[in-house]
Image (cartoon, coloured by chain):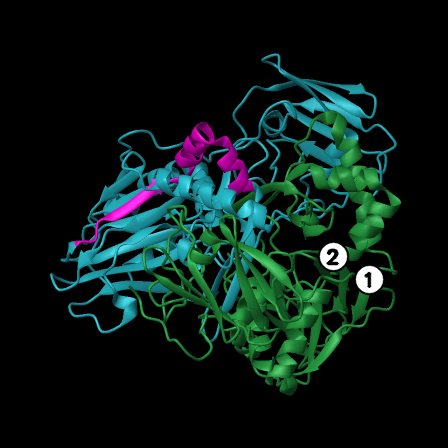
Chain colours: A green, B cyan
Amino acid sequence: MNSVATSGAPDMQELFPYADGPRLASAAPDTGSIQLSWQNGDTTQLPWLWLRDHCACAECRHPQTRERLYIPLAPIADAPEMNVIDGHLRLTWADGHRSVFHGGWLHQRRPEVALPNVLPEASAWRDHFTPERIEHAAFLTEKGEQAWLTAILRDGLALLTDGPLVEEEVSRLAEKIGPQRATNFGARFDVRSKPNPNNAAYTAVGLALHIDLPNWHHPPDIQLLYCLQNGASGGESLFADGVRVVEALRAQDPSALRTLSETPIDFRFQDETHDIAVRAPLIDLNADGSLRELRFNNWIRDTLHLPVEQMNAWYHAYRTLWALFHSDEHQLEFTLEPGQMVAFDNRRVLHGRRAFDPNSGPRHLQGTYLDRDMLESRLRVLARQLH
Amino acid sequence: MNSVATSGAPDMQELFPYADGPRLASAAPDTGSIQLSWQNGDTTQLPWLWLRDHCACAECRHPQTRERLYIPLAPIADAPEMNVIDGHLRLTWADGHRSVFHGGWLHQRRPEVALPNVLPEASAWRDHFTPERIEHAAFLTEKGEQAWLTAILRDGLALLTDGPLVEEEVSRLAEKIGPQRATNFGARFDVRSKPNPNNAAYTAVGLALHIDLPNWHHPPDIQLLYCLQNGASGGESLFADGVRVVEALRAQDPSALRTLSETPIDFRFQDETHDIAVRAPLIDLNADGSLRELRFNNWIRDTLHLPVEQMNAWYHAYRTLWALFHSDEHQLEFTLEPGQMVAFDNRRVLHGRRAFDPNSGPRHLQGTYLDRDMLESRLRVLARQLH
């Protein structure tokens, strides 16, 4: 038999605050479950097995790792003894095991209401969308970092300004959030031009809108591009919001949206040491029709391998989406200044750039990728602290 | 107007071999398309726009990066002039642009047949499944690496043997394939016990079967565990094949499979600096009912947040799946010896270990993760070379 403190608020091994909320007033037996009522009139019902499974004692939930140790391998046949003391639920199970639940923790977890969630919903860009701007110094504060993370998850893009002109600053900022995501191009990459370029990688041509690495099963989630030099004329950055443009496509040509979202095609990059390929639709929608992710990148479209009677319809749909993305209405254009970093959701927001004159001055960006999980995690941790 | 070589086999900027196959015999006009016939009797039809889109000349496909430069933004209104010369298709478009297609390359890409694919299908374990064993020295050859990659993609698990007892060998082997995938636990991790452990991380308890990090949107694809020391008694490694066990669940209790695959639940890890969470079903199935991925990890199941009337059914289904995974019939058990490395598909094959006696000797594994894309890519590159 475990021992539980008999006074004081129970510790649910849960770092997100749960002590707010109304006081638990009473518990009453029901068939295989317990009815709970709070002083504000809220009620709920929780099965015995659910309660047993969520016991937070040191035997059932690891006191250091907070991970679940209890494994719900048998139904619970007998009603526990129950008491509500000081607004918390105390149960004694038939085998003598005791569980204590904080009334506020249970209130947060009523099946009838959504769990606490601090992540913003994705919000489509509107006309004259202006990215959230966060100064580098502000980003280093909890409030500023929270604003930056919120903007990226909500708008798919945020601008950091007034940063230092030092190499690798992009990696330092990234690693405040999480480990850099490495790809076949390394963990941190340079986008650089030089006067009189002597290498194809340093070309200065315009880049049509695209996402990076749609030929991977899981393309990079978040891209950071930090500007160190931008003395060339031209080279404006271009962005377009996939959430908005997919809605525009749905309104203008729903059959094109169906074609692009239901037809898997091939994406592929090949060189002497790699052949990275995936077959997936260009637009992936959630069950509710909202955008899950885009795979838009003309350079690494591989052979279009479809029944011949579907090919012209696919090209028509592709052209239609291309025109929507590249229309003035949907393109955000600005010049990234030295000391600025743009961060964007690589699977939602397309990026590109205008051509520039490489003989007019140096242009040097450093970039890296982050996993979305790490941004969401930071936002949850900050919400805990700023609660 | 571009210039194309008028003799010799055309270069399609394609590294996978395509010159084999029957000789292209003839081309004939059709409505908006061209009919092709090969000498072995195979035929196909390809639309003008498809052909224009796949032109491999230096203007249309980058000669260094092999990426597509042509953007199919307009329908093709006029029939090209066509010739078959030396078994290859030569087209001259109305605007004067010329395209040349290798007859073997076109034959590989007939819409009626599957594209070349060197990746094995996933194959469920059978009774007395024995993992493919590849010696460390063999792995360093192309044939051995190919066998290792094929086994992991087919069986979800492979064993490397007779490796050196040196720290970081797991990272060296991993980076032959691709960059290590970093998580909140770092890029390379230690699973270590010491006699008289003084830290909870060095416990010696048995670990029930699980996948790592199902609380991430995209859990690590492939896990490598390299054994440096295993002098403790106990500590046998345990594995079970998700493909096989999901089929067993479908046969035994299809309603439990439906419950687990259609009910998103929450997974979550929280500590002082992280709160990494995702809501997803425990079993994710492809449209054809086959397994896409598992999220099976009792430690980081978060609050079960479901309508109360679904809870007992979910627990019943979970118990049923748990029992199938942990049955003798489905568990592969062996002792990982020093110098051996087990690699497995973390989203398909569950892993665990028996308890061991930490006072009986040292046990030290080093582990890391790889992206599946990198294994598939290596296998395609090796197939090119071993063709």
N-terminal-most mark, 1 or 2: 2
Badge 1 density bin: few <14, some 14–19, many ≥20, Cα 10 Å: many
Residue reaching furthest to the top: B41
Residue B304 is one of the magenta-drawn residues: no
Asked if A226 appears above or below B156 in the picture, the reply is: below
Element class at badge 2: strand
Q: Quadrant of the N terminus of chain B?
A: top right
Q: Percent position (x, y) of residue A302?
A: 63, 41
State left or right for residue A279 relative to residue B209. right
Query: Which amino acid, by three-letter code, is at mark 2?
Result: Leu
Residue sitting at 56 percent across and 45 percent down?
Answer: B310
Can residue A97 be seen in this snapshot? yes
What residue is shown with label 2? A209
Residue lying at 45% horizontally and 72% vertically, measured from the top left: B271
Q: How many residues crowd mark 2 within 10 Å: few (<14), some (14–19), many (20+)?
A: many
Asked whether A323 or B34 is in front, the reply is A323
Q: Residue at x 67, y 77 (%)?
A: A147
Secondary element at image label 1: loop
Main SS, magenta residues:
helix
Identify residue for label 1.
Answer: A331
Taking the image as shown, residue B237 lies to the left or right of residue B188, namely left
Q: Chain of mark 2?
A: A
Quadrant location of residue A174?
Answer: bottom right
Residue B284 appears in the rendering = no
Image: magenta residue range: B234-261
Counting from the top left corner in percent of width and height, residue A167 is at 55, 79
Q: Is residue B256 on the magenta stretch?
A: yes
Which is more toward the observer, A315 or A364? A315
The kind of residue on which mark 1 rests is: Gln
**Which residue is the extreme one toward the left?**
B360
